[in-house]
Image (cartoon, rainbow, N blue to C red):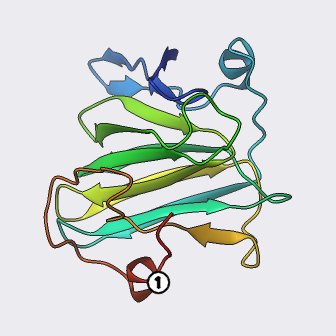
Amino acid sequence: MKLHKTNLEGVYVVELEPKEDERGSFTRIFCQNELSGQGISFNIAQSNLSINKHKGILRGLHFQKPPKAEDRIVQCLKGAIYDVALDLRPDSPTYGKSFAAELSESNPKSMYIPKGVAHGFQTLADDSRVLYFMSEFYSPEHYFGVRWDDPALGLDWPIKNPILSSQDQNWPYI
């Protein structure tokens, strides 16, 4: 694993390094030692799988508020997604800024998203599957989101008129 800094404080693209031979490949997708080397303390409390039937589905922008704030590592196992991180930490030098990257089954990368940074993604292919490692358990009373289309954010989603849940349609603007 190699961690690459992004334009958002504390957000990293994690480059996975598959080892291939005639049988296939083997890839380490999580290593606490590698994260610790960058000053990241991450313990997996929960792992989630998001299965998305259609291209154009948009999920986000979500986060959990303290004291149940969570770090996340996100990887696309099948299909492709446009993955977005939005810095909502008021004391951060990158507050209000975002970072986006394409993650896909053919692209051996994941994204590390720290506490206080909202996360969302849009599917770029049918039957996209997204794996999450979470540092905190899901807490409905701390779960929150912001509008994916808030003009103040300036996000440019690749597919216009996305497929949204009613919850994601009704999050507040910043």
Disc 1 element: helix
Q: Residue at x 67, y 71 (%)?
A: 143
Task: Using a 10 Å C-alpha cutoff, classify the residue at mark 1 as few (fewer than 14 neighbours), some (14 to 19) or many (20 or more).
Answer: few
Q: Is residue 1 above or below residue 42?
A: above
Instruction: Say which quarter of the image contains residue 7.
Output: top left
Residue at the far bottom: name it. Answer: 166
Question: Residue 55, located in which quarter of the rendered image?
Answer: bottom left
- Based on the displayed image, in which of its 4 quarters is residue 168 positioned? bottom left
According to the image, label 1 marks what residue?
A: 167
Name the kind of residue labelled 1 in the image. Answer: Gln
Q: Is residue 94 left or right of residue 123?
A: right
The total of numbered circles placed on residues is: 1
Front one among 29 and 172: 172
Q: State the residue in front, 17 or 34.
A: 34
Tell me: residue 168, above or below residue 44. Answer: below
Q: Position of residue 68 (x, y in %)?
A: 81, 59
Decide: is 21 above or below 125.
above
Residue at 65% in and 33% down = 92
Left or right: residue 145 versus residue 105 is right
- Most extreme residue toward the front is 152
Residue 135 percent across, percent down from the top left: 74, 48
Q: Residue at x 42, y 57 (%)?
A: 120
Q: Nearer the viewer, residue 132 or 77?
A: 132
Residue 24: x and y in percent read 31, 27
Q: Is residue 96 left or right of residue 135?
A: left
